[in-house]
Every structure is written in C-alpha cells, then in structure tokens.
C-alpha cells in the first residue's frame, strides 16, 4: 500500500468548474492517468484499453445519513488508460459516470447484494467471485469533514482509509477529502502492482496536468479535449 501527498480541494474544484464535471470525475481521471503512466513505463500496449473499476454509490437519502447499516449499490466505471489526452480522459470518465447515474445499475446491484446476504456462505463465495471478475479495481471517493478534528486535544492533520476488496479484485483506490485537502491511497496485490509507490507518485503530476490546462484555458468557456490539444501544442 502507498499514499500520496494531499491535493488542495479548491484546486480540484477549479478543474471541475473549468471542465464542467464533478470533483469525483477529476479525481478518477487523475487516477486513470497515474495508472496509464505506470503501465506505459512497464511496457504495456494501451491503445484503446480501459480498466473497469467497481465504484460504490450511496443510495441512502440525506435525511437518513446518520442511520447505521449499509445502503449502497455498485456501478462499473471505465477508466480510459489508453487515452493520452488528459482532458479527453476526464471527459470520458465524466460521460461514463453520468450514464451510470442515469441508469438503474446501482439499485439492481444493491438488490442482488441484499439477496446474496441471505444465501448460504458457499453460494455467496461463488457469486462474489463471479461479480469481482467483472472489474480490475475497486475505487471510492469519501467526502470527509471539512473542518479540523481533534483527538485528545491534538489536531488530526491527515486521514486515510482503505477500500474493502472482495473476490479476485486486486487493486483498491481510496480517495478521502478532509479539511480542504484530498488524500489518495492505493492498495494492491503485489503480483499486479509490486511497487505501488510508483503509481502513487504519479498521481500529483497527473492532476497538475489537468490543473495547468484548466488555468491556461479560456475561462469564459468549458475546456474540452480539442482546446487541450491547442494548449499542449
């Protein structure tokens, strides 16, 4: 496992505003860029390649936020690691997430998971293995408290968590925002990624590409992939 230096949440929001997408879209695109750079260094041929990530989706209404128990579904998000243009990569992540939000995939997954919870353990194991084979990674973005917390009179400076992995999924991407900063962690099977630090150290530079293009673009219009090409020329 490894974790990166935190990003400024306001910078992430600035990229989202420039590209008309969400904070989650920006962070997932930066993660895709970090994985792409790592895979290219290892000699992978990535043209047209996508990695599928299982992403938990909260289904609990805001008024029930303090109730205990799990109430989430799962969707499959495509991370376009084969795309070299960072803004087009972000556009593809955002488009995929919009389609998923407008589908009933998360609700259907929630129903299936609930049904599995009542099945015998042997059936659960087989079903979870089949389910996990549909994705390479599991990724989640958790919005944490945006004010400093204290424990025993000491200020908590940073937070991190590790997303649960089931079945044969060997890569977990954990993103947590806390007190105006975004923390990014990676946990992986050593057979898939023996050196997670090599992925993590790419996360900041990949986000910096997005931030640079957002700041250099025309602030009066949405930054798109062709506009990014012109800026990088």
Image: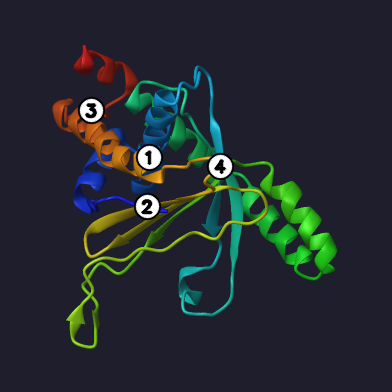
x then y, percent, for residue 182:
28, 55
Q: Name the quadrant containing residue 83.
A: top left
Evaluate if marks 3 and 1 touch, with contact meaning CB atoms under 8 Å apart. Answer: no
x then y, percent, for residue 8:
20, 51
Count residues near mark 4 (Cα–Cα under 10 Å), then give few for <14, some for 14-19, many for 20+.
Answer: few
Identify whether 139 is placed above or below 60: above
Mark toward the start of the polypeptide (4 vs 3)? 4
Q: For the residue labelled by badge 2, is the local secondary structure a helix, a strand or a loop? A: strand
Identify whether 162 is placed above or below 209: below
Q: Which mark is residue 2?
A: 2
Mark toward the start of the polypeptide (4 vs 1)? 4
Q: What residue does disc 4 label?
A: 191
User: In this rendering, does residue 47 appear at all?
Assistant: yes
Evaluate if marks 2 and 3 touch, with contact meaning CB atoms under 8 Å apart. Answer: no
Q: How far apart are the two marked residues, 4 and 2, measured between alpha carbons?
A: 15 Å
Q: Which mark is residue 221?
A: 3
Evaluate if marks 4 and 2 touch, with contact meaning CB atoms under 8 Å apart. Answer: no
- Residue toward you, 171 or 78: 171
The residue depicted at 67 percent of the width and 60 percent of the height is 110
- Residue toward you, 11 or 162: 162
- Residue toward you, 69 or 20: 69
Horizontal relation, residue 186 to residue 156: left or right: right
Q: How far apart are the two marked residues, 2 and 1, measured between alpha carbons?
A: 9 Å
Q: For the residue labelled by badge 4, is the local secondary structure a helix, a strand or a loop? A: loop
Q: What residue does disc 1 label?
A: 199
Colour option used: rainbow
The residue depicted at 26 percent of the width and 65 percent of the height is 158
């Amino acid at each position: 496992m490894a974790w990166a230096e935190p990003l400024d949440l306001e910078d992430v929001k600035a990229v989202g505003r420039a590209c008309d997408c969400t904070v989650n879209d920006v962070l997932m695109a930066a993660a895709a860029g970090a994985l792409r750079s790592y895979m290219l260094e290892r000699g992978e041929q990535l043209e047209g390649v996508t990695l599928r990530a299982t992403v938990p989706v909260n289904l609990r209404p805001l008024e029930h936020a303090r109730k205990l128990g799990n109430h989430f579904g799962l969707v499959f998000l495509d991370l376009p690691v084969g795309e070299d243009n960072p803004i087009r990569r972000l556009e593809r992540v955002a488009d995929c997430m919009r389609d998923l939000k407008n589908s009933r995939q998360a609700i259907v997954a929630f129903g299936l998971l609930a049904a599995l919870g009542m099945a015998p353990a042997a059936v659960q194991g087989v079903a979870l293995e089949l389910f996990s084979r549909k994705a390479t990674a599991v990724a989640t973005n958790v919005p944490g408290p945006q004010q400093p917390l204290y424990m025993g009179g000491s200020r908590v400076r940073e937070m991190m968590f590790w997303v649960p992995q089931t079945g044969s999924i060997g890569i977990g991407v954990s993103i947590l925002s806390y007190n105006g900063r975004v923390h990014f962690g990676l946990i992986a099977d050593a057979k898939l990624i023996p050196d997670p630090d090599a992925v993590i150290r790419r996360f900041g530079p990949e986000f910096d590409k997005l931030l640079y293009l957002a700041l250099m673009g025309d602030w009066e219009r949405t930054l798109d992939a062709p506009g990014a090409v012109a800026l990088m020329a």
